[in-house]
Image (cartoon, grey):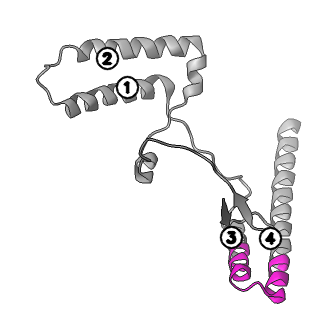
Amino acid sequence: MRSFRGANCDTDHYLVIAKVRERLAVVKQAAQRFDRQRFNLRKLNEPEVREQYQIEITNRFAALENFDDDEDVNRTWENIKEHIQTSAKESLSVHELKENKPWFDEECLGFYDQRKHAKMQWIQDPSQSDVDNLNNVGREVSRHFRNRKKAYLRATIEEHETNSKI
């Protein structure tokens, strides 16, 4: 059971999460997770891509069998890992990270930080004035986001209308 007091979910309640798990393995370091490339594994559902990937892996491991057995185990593992990654890059491509919405710009980020700061003040001193400040800032931020999104949608609709008339 854990309470996340600083979680920004636009409410005056605390976010509470409970996790029950049993592990026998050692937890991996967080730093190792971020340097990995993520491949688009959904492409493996397509039969042509799956066959191409299997052929590339087979060819690379056939070339790998010609190496000496006297090599270090770590070096052999690095070779195998490198071959798998290059094959995946060529046939599967790298998974693209999700981007922010087009209407979410630096000004919106400033409003978001302002709401986050008001929430932190309320957490540190839960007085009525801080609650009112948090509610007011939350309303301003929501209003700004809503107006920014409406303006973006209007501009997009106008652009599509002008393109359709041409």
Crowding at label 1, few (<14), some or many (≥20) Cα neighbours within 10 Å?
Answer: some
Which quarter of the figure has residue 161? top right
Q: Is residue 82 above or below residue 19?
A: above
| Sequence-first tag of 2 and 4 | 2
Residue 21 shown left or right of residue 57 in the figure: right
- Distance from the alpha carbon under mark 2 to that under mark 4: 54 Å
The three-letter code of the residue at mark 1 reads Ile
Q: How far across and down, in percent of the image, does residue 33 sit?
A: 45, 46
Residue at 49% x, 10% y is: 51
Residue at 50% x, 25% y is: 92
- Say which element carries label 1: helix
Which disc is residue 60 wearing? Answer: 2
Q: Is residue 65 above or below residue 2?
A: above
The three-letter code of the residue at mark 4 reads Val
- Distance from the alpha carbon under mark 2 to that under mark 1: 8 Å
The reply to whether discs 2 and 1 touch (Cβ–Cβ < 8 Å) is: yes
Q: Is residue 120 magenta?
A: yes
| Sequence-first tag of 2 and 1 | 2
- Say which element carries label 2: helix
The reply to whether discs 1 and 4 touch (Cβ–Cβ < 8 Å) is: no
Q: Is residue 102 magenta?
A: no
Reading the image, the residue beneath label 1 is: 84
